[in-house]
Amino acid sequence: MNLHLALLTLCQGLLMVNNVTFIAINGLVGLALAPVGWMATVPITAYVAGGALATGIVARHQRRWGRQRTFQLGLLVAIASAAVCAWAAMQRNFWLLTAATLVAGYYNANGSLYRFASVELVKPDFKERAISWVLAGGILGGVVGPNLASASRDLLAQPFAGAYLALMGVAALSLAVMSCIPFPTLPGQGSTTPQGRPTSVIVRQPVFIIATAACAIGYGVMNLLMAATPIAMAQCQHPFSAAALVLEWHVLAMFVPSFFTGKLIKRFGVLPIMATGLALNVACVAFALHGNDVMHFLGALMALGLGWNFLFIGGSTLVTETYAPEEKTRAQGAVDFCVYTTMTVTSFSSGALVTTGGWTAMNLGSIAPLLLLAAALAWLARLRRPSAPVAGT
């Protein structure tokens, strides 16, 4: 840990305050404003779809302007989009709210690169720990996000409109912190021409494919269940305060383990940690199918958060083996494009599933991608045996 890494960790925490608050309120605001109930999570879907659409743009901006200026631009977009969200909520305009969250995806796409930028602030031997430490900043989001949503629920006449105004302040604080982090110059920064291997060659590497799959499926399943949790708990007649509590502990389970996940990867290897994360996702589904009490939601979402931590940090660490320094912006953008595309599908599906099939159907639906990931991890484990080395590792 050093000062610049600590500041980036704080920016990650403020990013997660934004994201958790969005998850906590956008589904409920969407449910109140949407033309039909199954469209409730469309604003959440727009946020992650915006991230998917922005990944290529962000990669180009980072190659042209560097880390700091692009991150600062993302935070300016966050301030502006939060203001429009507040106005849309006050005017009860569902489509304006959706458009604002779509634009906010540019900030989300920027923020997803904080974990990769952390590696540039430490020596190479500490890359696993740097990624873990920055993601640990999400603890701030777990504590502040749900409580911010709950405290600001009735701040203005329209429920939750005040939360969007609060997020403007959160982004402004992050902008000030980001201005104090002098990132190293990226290889090829300022060039408009990509350097290194073609992106098509990078993404065809077996290690890249599995690392990306772990990040995408881990995030996709987590997003599928987390986005629908406030709606599912409301359907079960649980108060919003209970949903906020569940989300708080879920996000803490996502990020508290980050203090030691890097060390575990260093000691046991990345694939065993990713396999453990997969097992925890299966445990989440089993727990959720057992009942609909608050404790069932709490236990399931905590297992889900811990499983995401192991899969996402493991996948993010693994993918750093697959590209040269001058290829990093394109490779990282390709990973996050897959992550956000998957999240877009699961965000939209969660609203449709929870309002038509219910909480049980959602959990049963998550089993298929988990089985697919299990097969992929087994395939990579076989390929990485000494007798069958993998090109690019």
Image (cartoon, rainbow, N blue to C red):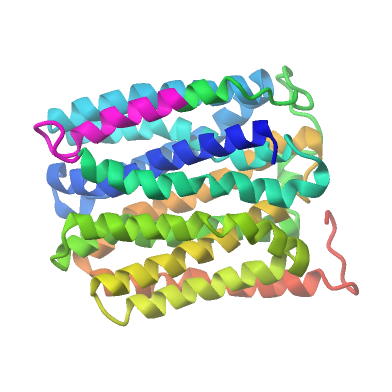
Percent across and percent down for residue 186 are: 75, 26
Q: Is residue 332 left or right of residue 268?
A: left
Image: 39 above or below 99 = below
Please state, as top left, top right, bottom left or bottom right, where the N terminus lies in the image.
top right
Q: Is residue 220 visible?
A: no
Instruction: Give, as a single range, the part of the protein colored magenta.
Output: 153-173
Percent across and percent down for residue 323 are: 78, 44
Q: Is residue 66 left or right of residue 149?
A: right
Q: Is residue 385 visible?
A: yes
Image: 288 above or below 37 = below
Query: Could you say which is closer to the camera, residue 134 or residue 384?
Result: 134
* Principal secondary structure, stretch drawn in magenta: helix
Percent across and percent down for residue 306 are: 51, 64
Query: Could you say which is closer to the camera, residue 165 or residue 328?
Result: 165
Name the residue: 20% across, 44% down: 30
Please identify the residue farthest to the left as the structure is shown.
157
Image: 284 above or below 351 = below
Q: In the image, is residue 163 part of the stretch drawn in magenta?
A: yes
Percent across and percent down for residue 58 are: 57, 29
Q: In the image, is residue 240 part of the stretch drawn in magenta?
A: no
Query: Could you say which is closer to the camera, residue 350 or residue 119?
Result: 119
Please identify the residue farthest to the bottom as the structure is shown.
290
